[in-house]
Image (cartoon, rainbow, N blue to C red):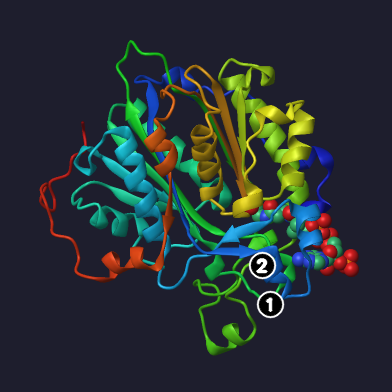
Amino acid sequence: MSLTSLTEQEQTVVPQAEGTEDRLCTYPVHVVGIGAAVPSDRLTNQALETMVDTSDEWIRTRTGIRERRIAPAPLASSDLGFAAARVALEQAGVTPADLDEIIVATVTPDYQFPSTACLLAARLGLVGIPAFDLAAGCSGLMYAIEQACQAIRSGSRRTVLVVAAETLSRVVNFHDRRTCVLFGDGAAALVLQRASLQDEPGILATNLGSDGRGAHLLVVPAGGSRLPASSQTIAQGLHYLQMSGSEVFKFAVRVMEESTRLVVARAGLRVEDIDCFIPHQANVRIIQAAAERLGLPAERIMVNVDRYGNTSAASIGLALVEAYQQGRLHPGDVVVMTGFGTGLTWGSVALRWTAPPPTPEQVRTLVYQATAADAAEALGTPPACPSPLPGESKNGV
Ligand code: UT7
């Protein structure tokens, strides 16, 4: 069923009822470290003009994008995720051995299996803790934060690494002007940690949702169990991303407003209380339309789509890191992140910022510029296994 065939009432997919999950929370959860990584290679609109029938003017006015980063071979999602994780861990003052779980949000994993999270855990020298991938498209980071939060609040985990890592350039058809101008590669990482019971909460509320009726609107048709890769699927380009851009556009504007209003209400706040709004960076027109519906002034909205394009699950994290790097986040600020993506999915997180301003050194290093050489380590000898030994899980902290 097409979303366009639904009535306006049916299209209102975000439940309006108040959530109850916040009443169940026990431990407060704080973001104690963030980091990002992007490939150092830039693909400008001018370069795209030489590849497909497009123009810098069309791309800028329709999307707001000027350039995006493209991972050179053999750089993969786990390499970008690893680089982002190292920055976040260092910033948090946390060692890999302190981690109780790793969640990676991605739709462009290194392999169909094993999971990118397991590759990342091995790169960090970790054996024994749970590590898994989560596929929720561009809402992936919001989903991963909620999963981490629930585990920490319940007391079953103390410190969780959440990573969003994507190499969309690997599934984009660079002969298709409708999609190849939009996407880029990048990664972001957050360290979430339990605070003491007396502390104020950092993460205030979350809101996630999905509507699989729109699954066909943004899809990589081949390569899964429905349509396994074959010479035929490759000849037909079915291993590339396909998107109904204008349908996704309408869905995005509606759902970003609804999900944001809901998460803010769950946090016991009003939209006017948002100090920094960090939307998924897909298209500046979507961001502006959603912000207009919410009545948010431009100075409270974080936008960096011009320099990175749409990096799917990584985009909100990359924008959060840049907002912090630019000194836009202060202790006590209300930050609301919201995204939408393939599935269709949506998700929002409201939090009160608790980290002190970055040091000059952190400002320089929060976004790591990755090169092909960063993949060499992963392709070489696997890292040695430190304790805990296989089977010695750290669960139940
Ligand atoms: O993360 C979630 C995933 N995706 C998104 O959030 C994307 C959501 N959608 C969008 O951002 C927008 O719909 C697009 C940027 C994809 C497209 O913008 P639009 O204003 O909806 O354009 P359109 O698809 O209606 O196309 C308008 C025209 C068409 O030409 P005709 O048929 O009117 O002659 C397209 O063929 O623009 C043409 N066009 C292009 N022209 C130059 C489409 N792509 C290009 C291009 N360069 N790259």
- Which residue does the image show at 57% across and 50% down from the upper left? 138
Q: How many marks?
A: 2
At which x and y percent is residue 228?
51, 78
Which quadrant is home to the N terminus?
Answer: bottom right
At which x and y percent is residue 196?
29, 17
Q: Residues within 10 Å of mark 2 (few under 14, many from 20)?
A: some
Name the residue nearer the viewer: 210 or 107. 107
Which structural element holds mark 2? helix
Amino acid tagged 1: His
At which x and y percent is residue 8?
83, 40
Residue at which label 1 appears: 175
Which quadrant is home to the C terminus?
Answer: top left
Residue at which label 2 appears: 180
At which x and y percent is residue 291?
74, 33
- Which residue does the image show at 35% across and 67% down from the upper left? 373
Residue 216, by quadrant, is: bottom right
Q: Which mark is residue 376?
A: none
For ligand 1, the image quadrant comes to: bottom right
- In the image, residue 229 sits, relative to residue 380, either above or below, namely below
Name the residue nearer the viewer: 374 or 203. 374
- Which residue does the image show at 71% across and 49% down from the upper left? 283
- In the image, residue 117 sits, relative to residue 320, either above or below, namely below
Label 2, ligand 1: CB separation under 8 Å? yes
Amino acid tagged 2: Cys
Q: Residues within 10 Å of mark 1 (few under 14, many from 20)?
A: few
Question: Is residue 2 visible to us here?
Answer: no
- In the image, residue 367 sits, relative to residue 120, either above or below, namely above
- Which residue does the image show at 53% across and 70% down from the upper left? 170
Dot placed on the residue nearer the N-terminal end, 2 or 1: 1
**Horizontal placement of 310 versus 363: left or right?**
right
The answer to whether mark 2 and mark 1 are in CB contact below 8 A is: yes
